[in-house]
Image (cartoon, rainbow, N blue to C red):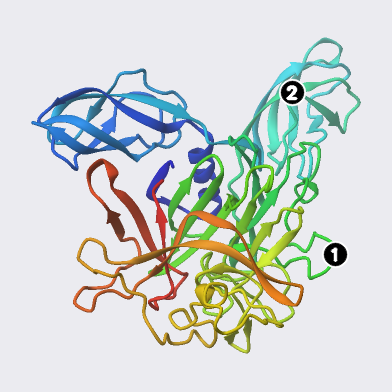
């Protein structure tokens, strides 16, 4: 999994641009040693030389033989490689010299839509009958504000020679060049070759649609928006992409529009949202060609998060052909990142808004193509009420209102019930017991549990559990440690194993919560 650690964005729109830069340009997929060099030490970090990039790829030395590198792994896959270095790639850094690498690059995601603004234009087809100071408007813009250009000079027959920008517009789907134009004058036929930049105004809506390189073609969407004082992400999944359709009309779009532009019941603004800010955001992005996981730090100690894309289904591609998950932190769109309401929670423990809420803050597209909400509990009068039928386990327990499983059926009931260690009620509740490793020590401190998506239902009068799958790389974490050892903190890294086989997990708290059952860890895969 390409991994980017703790970069910084200036606001929620800049964060969208940074995500695009990371996801849609070349990044390192594999590394092999071309020449081991001399004088190196295990743990050295080597930086790739050459190429054109936003952030250079880095590699960790995992083993050496008398100073010669014979084990290497990707530490940072690099960001924004618009030109890749030729193999063998020389490196800098570490305690030695002369190590060269053979790298393969790939692009995990393709940009399908991103809000832009016109920056300049040159005349492609001059047309006829124009006059100086006529206004040219770029035609056929989908779901946005047209760009406007001024006719500066003309030639014989009123042919347009040069233009200048009047209004950049706010364009959600720029027309392919050469762009046809309309005019407030008498001319016809002018086409412009327009240069577009990403729009940066944080008061406007910004749309993003990406297509993953996985063979099943995941499509995900983000709308960055302002609602009152909130500057947030609206999250969506799709089953395809149509360039001639508005964002809200894309195929198979998941529920929840911040501007209430979706239709039907329940309330159209209920969905999956991640609260952010229009100030500095520290972020961590974990992605492959199937999904994007993000953690975003605002202020001193608030970590919001999202999961967009495919989860790992417990079934074949034929049995579960499009296993899409969309996880945010809040079911309503106008939540500030600094909010303390109980219904504001992260992807390991989604909480519904209230007892009438029916969408979000996490959504799953099931085998029948139906978007279903995932909630471990709901918010009611400032407290959590338990329990829900479709949950993210182990922080949630899937129980229906007519649960008839016998108390002595340990595997099907108690095996999926963790309420003693992870309270489902109250604000937030106190655990009655702790999850501890069998042999806690200073290198392996935490109990990590894969997050499973479990739905309860009834069949022939008995409650059944359907395990849809796991969120890729995401683990619920018990922060109950050996009493002689300090607990983990957000941004810590847990290591399992050593050398070339080491596995790393990055620890974060759930939004602003710091109880021992509110932490999660994301695996470097």
Q: Earlier in the sequence, mark 2 or mark 1?
A: 2
- Residue 153 is situated, as x and y percent measured from the top left of the image, at 74, 20
Nearer to us in this view, 99 or 399: 399
- The front one of 270 and 260 is 270
Which quadrant of the view contains residue 329?
bottom right
Give the quarter of the figure containing the C terminus.
top left
Q: Which element carries disc 2, helix, strand or loop?
A: strand
What is the x, y in percent for residue 461?
A: 75, 77
Residue that mark 1 sits on: 264
**Location of residue 353 with respect to 207 vertically, above or below:** below
- Most extreme residue toward the front, as rendered? 408
> Is 43 on the left-hand or right-hand side of 11?
left
Q: Position of residue 213 (x, y in %)?
A: 58, 35
402 shown above or below 67: below
115 horizontally vs 248: left or right: left
Q: Residues within 10 Å of mark 2 (few under 14, many from 20)?
A: many
Query: In terms of secondary structure, where does tag 1 sit?
Result: loop
In this rendered view, identify the residue nearer to me: 386 or 46.
Answer: 386
Q: Position of residue 10 (x, y in %)?
A: 46, 53
Q: Is residue 333 visible?
A: no
Report the disc number at residue 119.
none
User: For the residues marked 2 and 1, what is the alpha-carbon distance in whole angstroms?
Assistant: 41 Å
- 117 in relation to 395, above or below: above
The disc label shown at residue 192, or none: 2
Residue in view at x 34 percent, y 61 percent: 491
Residue at 30% from the left image edge and 61% from the top image edge: 492
Crowd rating for badge 1 (residues with CA inside 10 Å; few <14, some 14–19, many 20+): few
């Amino acid at each position: 999994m390409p991994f980017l650690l703790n970069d910084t964005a200036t606001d929620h729109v800049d964060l969208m641009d940074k995500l695009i830069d990371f996801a849609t340009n070349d990044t390192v997929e594999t590394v092999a040693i071309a020449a081991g060099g001399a004088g190196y030490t295990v743990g050295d970090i080597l930086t790739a030389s050459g190429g054109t990039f936003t952030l250079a790829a880095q590699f960790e030395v995992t083993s050496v033989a008398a100073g010669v590198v014979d084990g290497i792994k990707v530490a940072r896959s690099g960001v924004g490689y618009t030109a890749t270095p030729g193999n063998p790639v020389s490196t800098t850094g570490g305690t030695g010299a002369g190590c060269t690498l053979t790298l393969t690059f790939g692009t995990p995601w393709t940009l399908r839509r991103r809000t832009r603004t016109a920056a300049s234009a040159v005349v492609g087809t001059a047309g006829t009958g124009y006059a100086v100071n006529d206004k040219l408007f770029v035609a056929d813009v989908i779901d946005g504000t047209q760009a406007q250009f001024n006719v500066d000079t003309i030639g014989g027959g009123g042919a347009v020679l040069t233009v200048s920008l009047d209004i950049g517009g706010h364009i959600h789907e720029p027309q392919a060049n050469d762009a046809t134009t309309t005019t407030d004058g008498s001319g016809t036929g002018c086409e412009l070759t327009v240069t577009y930049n990403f729009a940066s105004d944080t008061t406007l809506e910004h749309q993003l649609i990406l297509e993953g390189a996985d063979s099943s073609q995941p499509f995900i969407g983000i709308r960055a928006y302002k609602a009152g004082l909130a500057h947030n992400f609206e999250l969506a999944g799709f089953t395809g992409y149509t360039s001639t359709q508005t964002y809200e009309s894309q195929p198979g779009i998941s529920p929840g529009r911040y501007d209430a532009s979706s239709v039907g019941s329940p309330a159209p603004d209920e969905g999956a949202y991640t609260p952010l800010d229009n100030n500095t955001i520290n972020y961590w992005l974990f992605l492959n060609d199937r999904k994007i996981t993000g953690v975003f730090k605002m202020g001193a100690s608030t970590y919001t998060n999202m999961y967009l894309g495919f989860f790992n289904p417990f079934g074949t591609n034929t049995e579960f052909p499009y296993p899409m998950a969309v996880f945010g932190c809040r079911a309503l769109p106008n939540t500030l990142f600094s909010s303390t309401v109980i219904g504001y929670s992260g992807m390991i423990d989604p909480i519904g808004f209230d007892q009438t809420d029916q969408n979000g803050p996490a959504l799953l597209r099931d085998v029948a193509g139906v978007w279903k909400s995932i909630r471990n509990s709901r918010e009611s009068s400032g407290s959590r009420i338990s329990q829900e039928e479709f949950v993210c386990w182990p922080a949630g327990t899937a129980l229906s209102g007519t649960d008839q499983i016998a108390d002595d059926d340990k595997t099907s009931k108690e095996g999926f019930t963790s309420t003693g260690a992870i309270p489902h009620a109250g604000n937030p509740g106190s655990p009655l017991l702790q999850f501890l490793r069998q042999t806690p020590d200073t290198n392996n401190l935490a109990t990590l549990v894969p997050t499973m998506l479990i739905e309860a239902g009834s069949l022939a009068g008995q409650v059944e559990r359907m395990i849809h799958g796991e969120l890729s790389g995401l683990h619920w974490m018990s922060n109950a440690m050996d009493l002689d050892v300090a607990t983990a903190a957000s941004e810590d890294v847990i290591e399992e194993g050593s050398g070339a086989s080491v596995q790393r997990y990055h620890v974060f708290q759930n939004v602003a919560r710091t109880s021992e059952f509110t932490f999660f860890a994301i695996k470097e895969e």
